[in-house]
Amino acid sequence: MKIGVISLGCAKNLVDTENLLGLLRESGLEITTSWKQADAMIINTCGFIESAKSEAIDTILEAADYKETGLQKLIVMGCLSQRYKKELEKEMPEVDRFIAIDEYPNLGKILSGVLGVTIHNTYGKTPRMLSDKPWMAYLRIADGCDNRCSYCAIPLIRGPFVSRPLQEIVDEAEYLISIGVKELNLIAQDSSRYGIDLYGKLMLSELLRRLDELKGIKWIRILYLYPDEIPDDLIDTMHECRHVLPYFDIPVQHGSDRILRDMNRRGSRALIVERCRKIRESFPEAVLRTTLIAGFPSETPEDHQKSLSLLEEVHFDRMGAFAYSKEEGTQAFDMEELADEAEKKRRLDELMSLQSRIGRERLESHVGEVTEVLVEREDPLTGMYIGRSYMHAPDNVDGCVRFRAKRPYQPGEFTYVRLLRTAGLNYIGEETENA
């Protein structure tokens, strides 16, 4: 039986998909990338915000059309199934099985029943099958969330915050390195809280020290740090570790203390500014990435101005932003909205425009520097290589480094590049011998 697998949504969802692929491979099933050749399709969905839900529904309906030309089974799993399983079962009879996240411990048994073939019931215990670049992997250190931000449905979908045992993470990292991974990207809904539930204290520093000791690792990047849980000892540990990159992904969400309280966010604007200042004191070369929400229900024009002024004060290197959208089941769902959709879009555009200017300034500040680059591919049109430096996360939002080289490179190799100029979010450079 040939199985096609589609993964939608975030990196955490991708890890679930790779665990599924490992399970299918271990069970002897053939995995295909062709929808036309697939006997069965499994779609791992996101259900976080409206646009993600729409993408998931469109993908399911598109896959269902293949039932007219040979597709035998269509299975949907992931966040959308967890959140809306009963409703989807009524509205989409063309789907043979919706599998909720809390059913994953029995995934093998469920798939065996639906597909009529034997699939081992070892989800999460079988080595993952990497689905993207073999030199890079996401390493999930925890799942779920206890923060209960008033706009966010993640705790409703993924449940409470649960850290993985430290040794289990180290063991998986060792396996990933053994199959060629050189860059580990640590992910959780709130990576900064790692260990608090298992060990009664924050353990991210200890985890980083253990991972930094592993032979064969080159880069370790941490994603999703909350500003109120970036203690000095974590910054010090990152500075001491040879392989941990000075890359700080800190979702602050707003610049107004009043809105932060309405969002049920811990900490304050002053704390955000102070932690970012501390990071830049310790790492002058640090990259700071963040996210902001425009048009939260209680946001006034004055609150919006405070988000703009926060960008001016901190000068984040990267920022993603989105207009607030209602999510059923959240605390903010029933709040009266002060801004209509047009005003929310205007505020979003204003944030993005300001960050565009700041981001260009931050990019240009590195021109002339020599930086290590992970080569990912060669552009067949220009002959230039395309890669990423420590400043570029692997999720295609930070841009890349394009450079010319005197010798051929294979994807997954490292080299040094002098940054000559910027082009949008990207750098143009040339290979150099050393830093």
Image (cartoon, helix red, strand yellow):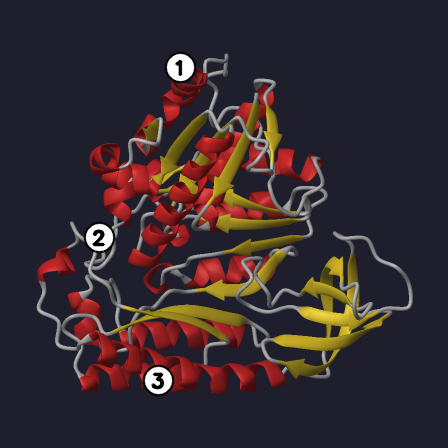
Could you tell me if residue 161 is visible in this image?
A: no
Count neighbours of disc 2 (C-alpha within 10 A) and say few if under 14, some if 14 to 19, many if 20 or more. Answer: some
Vertical placement of residue 387 versus 426, above or below: above
Question: Which circle marks residue 148 in the picture?
Answer: 2
Q: Quadrant of residue 37?
A: top right
| Label 2 vs label 1, nearer the camera | 1
| Label 1 vs label 3, nearer the camera | 1
Where is mark 1, residue-wise?
Answer: 113
Relative to 216, is 261 on the left or the right?
left
Q: Residue at x 50, y 32 (%)?
A: 69
Q: Separation of disc 2 and disc 1 at Cα?
A: 36 Å
Q: Residue at x 19, y 86 (%)?
A: 302
Q: Quadrant of residue 178?
A: top right
Q: Separation of disc 2 and disc 3 at Cα?
A: 28 Å
Q: Residue at x 31, y 37 (%)?
A: 81
N-terminal-most mark, 2 or 3: 2
Are circles 1 and 3 on residues that touch, CB within 8 Å? no
Helix, strand or loop under label 1: helix
N-terminal-most mark, 1 or 3: 1
**Where does the C terminus fall, quadrant-wise?**
bottom right
Percent coordinates x, y for residue 169 in the rendering: 52, 37
Badge 3 amino acid: Glu
Count neighbours of disc 3 (C-alpha within 10 A) and say few if under 14, some if 14 to 19, many if 20 or more. Answer: some
Badge 2 amino acid: Arg
Residue, far front = 68
**Where does the N terminus fall, quadrant-wise?**
top right
